[in-house]
Amino acid sequence: MRSAVALRHEALHLLLLGVTLGLPVTQLPQLQQATFHQPFLVAGFLVSIKGVLNTLLAPALGALVDKGGHFKFWLVLSLAIPCAPFLAILTQGEPGAQVWAFSLVDTFLGLSGPAMSLCFAVVPARTPERLTEGYSLLNFALSSGVGVGAACGAAVSLSGLGCVGLALGSLNALLALLNSPPRRCSTSLPALEVLKESSTLKLLALVVFLDFLAEQMLVSLLLLYLESRFHLSPWQLACELGLVGASASVSLLALVPRLQPRLGDLALMRLGMVANCVSVALFGIIWAPWQALLPPLGCFLAFAVFPTANALAAAAAPQSGALAQGVISGARTLAEGLAPVLFGGLFQVAARSAWPGWPFFVAAGCVALGTAISWQLPESRDNLLPAHGMHPVHAMHGMRVASRRWRVGTRPARHFRVHLVLPEAVAALVRKRRSR
């Protein structure tokens, strides 16, 4: 995979960032429940603030980088700041104080949205002819890192968690300092003007938000639901996580790169949302423990939503790549912050009802609503590259046709609109030949 070579630095940054984000996933909920008097209220409030800050800062930093540059400085800073919550653990001695310190500092400084948006913004510069494949690779690195971090976090103490998180975050920032940044074009367009004029970006952000509400509900509450209803063993829960991880790997590394050239980004995103809607709804009607292994099989295409949304955002704002990725990453992190709060309350109510799985249908309804909204996206933006305004397959075909015509000494037909079919370089050659 050529994208793996071109994006190796960004993939490593997102892998280490994912491990850092995943470290407290397994321990923190139990520790917060033992420390806070009202854990759902306090933890939900802090997570919501964090989601809102991610949503605001990711596109703001992207617009700043697009206009003023200094990409390397902001990338190093955005990768170093998530170390602060783990440093807060090491400054406290008692477990209760450590939990409070981590939770408060993580709310305001443990922000992943800015770093994600900057890493995703590099894809058009690194792999301009393979946008969706590049975004799939980076999403795979991020999700794999979260899974590895969650497994590692369960094996260490809270103080050890602080040491490991601080070391990984510092290493990630150091690697970003040593790597050379890609060449990116700056823009003079104001961020508010770009957001105001691009209805595609706003619709994409809404679609990603609705889809990730359901996905983050599964990430944060699915295992708790399965354990409380079916009393699954740790080995069975590990199998569930392993199956979801295998589905993500197959989807992002094999299915998405092969289906995108045939279906296009927009159609593939809609297909992934339909698959996500079905798989989420299936969790609401299972009645036996073994059936919990079936819905993840429908998640193969569900993981195609985010990389295709990244590609569509890059095409919608070609001169404001970091801003576009910041908007999409901000919608994703906002869903990460709100999903545990919203669906945690629904599951709390559903636990006392005769049908405890009905919140899964609410989540599936969110995805269905996002799918309906995706039909408002313009079809003409599908599969376009920001550099030439066309898919690379069409561009290369136009270059071959032009080369073949000039070799045999023929002249293009009068109705042949060169500026729509050929890249700019070939179009300039045609105009020069005609002027003679």
Image (tube, rainbow, N blue to C red):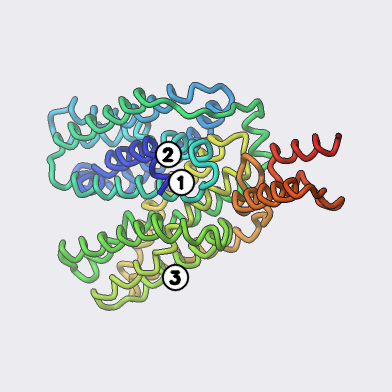
Residue at the spot 66% in from the left edge and 50% down from the top edge:
400
Three-letter amino acid code at the position of disc 1 = Gly
- Please report whichever mark, 2 or 1, sits nearer to the chain's N-terminal start: 2
Residue 370 in view (yes/no): no
- Which residue carries the number 1 mark? 134
Tell me, for residue 6, which label it has, or none: 2
Element under disc 2: helix
Q: Are marks 3 and 1 in contact (CB under 8 Å)?
A: no
Element under disc 3: helix
Residue at the spot 29% in from the left edge and 28% down from the top edge:
84
Tell me, for residue 278, which label it has, or none: 3
- Please report whichever mark, 2 or 3, sits nearer to the chain's N-terminal start: 2
Observer-nearest residue: 128 or 204? Answer: 128
Label 2 environment density (alpha carbons within 10 Å; few <14, some 14–19, many ≥20): some
> Could you say which quadrant of the image residue 374 lies in?
bottom right
Q: Is residue 53 left or right of residue 402?
A: left
Observer-nearest residue: 130 or 13? Answer: 130
Query: Residue 102: x, y in percent?
Result: 26, 34
2 or 3: mark nearer the eye: 2
> Could you say which quadrant of the image residue 237 lies in?
bottom left
Three-letter amino acid code at the position of disc 3 = Val
Q: Is residue 318 left or right of residue 97?
A: right
208 relative to 367, above or below: above
Observer-nearest residue: 233 or 418? Answer: 418
Query: Residue 146: x, y in percent?
Result: 30, 47
Residue 130 in view (yes/no): yes
